[in-house]
Image (spheres, grey):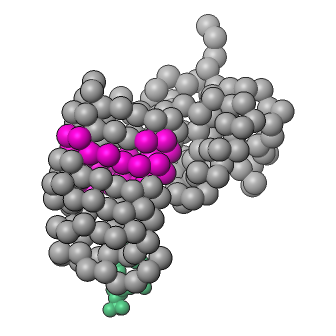
Amino acid sequence: MVKTKIYIYGASGHGQVLSDIARACGYDEVVFLDDSSDTKFSKDLPKFDIFIGVGVNDTRAILQEKVQKCGFKVVNLIHPSAVISPSAKFGVGVCVMPNVVVNAFAKVSDGVILNSGCVVEHECVIERFAHISPNAALAGNVYVGEFSHIGIGSSVIQGIKIGSNVSVGAGSVVVRNLAPNGVYVGVPTKFIKEK
Ligand SMILES: CC(=O)SCCNC(=O)CCNC(=O)[C@H](O)C(C)(C)COP(=O)(O)OP(=O)(O)OC[C@H]1O[C@@H](n2cnc3c(N)ncnc32)[C@H](O)[C@@H]1OP(=O)(O)O
């Protein structure tokens, strides 16, 4: 039987979760690439599938572009317990953690993290390298700009637009559009500072 191998670039806690998901997806062997690991990334490594296991949004984007330029195939890691509409569209380098729901006609772009148990409702658009934290819920038609982070357990009502490079604090409730490059917290969310 052919062994299937995947590199996970980044051996932090996030990387370890991805390793579990990779195994649940059928990979037999996970090789971590990290500055502190025995194996470091090199363009000369054998070309197995690869996934960037870094939670920091802009670093993940830089590394994903680097490995793609070196000819590696960046895959998606989607846990088998996730419930995903057949009409949802995905980029590459997307991870979907256990118990996530992605409903009809949602669009999830390259490098997005859909963390454990989050809900992405119908027709949401999640732009590149955004992160939807555990148990966050996005109602229908929500737009999340690139590099934005939606905090753990937060909720966003339908039709809201969240700009790029925004942080929404843990447990927040978003009921108005959020301008780019800001940190917003609370119920309902209020702007607290620039990013
Ligand atoms: C699997 C995983 O682990 S995925 C990761 C999940 N983690 C998250 O979702 C974390 C989300 N991050 C947060 O909520 C952070 O608190 C942030 C990004 C909103 C703000 O962090 P910082 O920039 O470090 O701000 P800081 O901690 O200094 O807080 C600034 C003020 O906002 C308040 N504040 C911070 N977060 C929140 C929040 N979620 N809700 C309400 N108020 C908050 C603080 O109490 C503080 O108020 P004060 O000035 O009156 O004392």
The residue lying at 58 percent from left, 51 percent from top is 61
Quick check: 98 above or below 137?
above
**Magenta segment main secondary structure:** loop
Q: Is residue 171 visible?
A: no
Q: Quadrant of the N terminus?
A: top right
Q: Quadrant of ligand 1?
A: bottom left
The residue lying at 18 percent from left, 75 percent from top is 187
Residue 82 in picture, x, y percent from top left: 31, 34
Give the residue furthest to the bottom.
192
Give the residue furthest to the right.
44
Question: Looking at this view, is 7 or 140 the one in front?
Answer: 140
The residue lying at 80 percent from left, 37 percent from top is 43
Residue 123 in picture, x, y percent from top left: 23, 41
Q: Is residue 55 visible?
A: yes
Quick check: 149 above or below 4?
below
The residue lying at 45 percent from left, 65 percent from top is 165
Instruction: Please say whether residue 79 is one of the residues in the magenta stretch.
Output: no
Q: Is residue 148 left or right of residue 156?
A: right
Q: Quarter of the image holding residue 97? A: top left
Q: Is residue 83 left or right of residue 66?
A: left
Residue 6 in picture, x, y percent from top left: 62, 30
Give the residues in magenta: 109-137
Instruction: Please say whether residue 133 is one of the residues in the magenta stretch.
Output: yes
Q: How many marks?
A: 0
Question: Looking at this view, is 53 or 122 the one in front?
Answer: 122
Give the residue furthest to the top.
1
Question: Looking at this view, is 20 or 53 the one in front?
Answer: 53
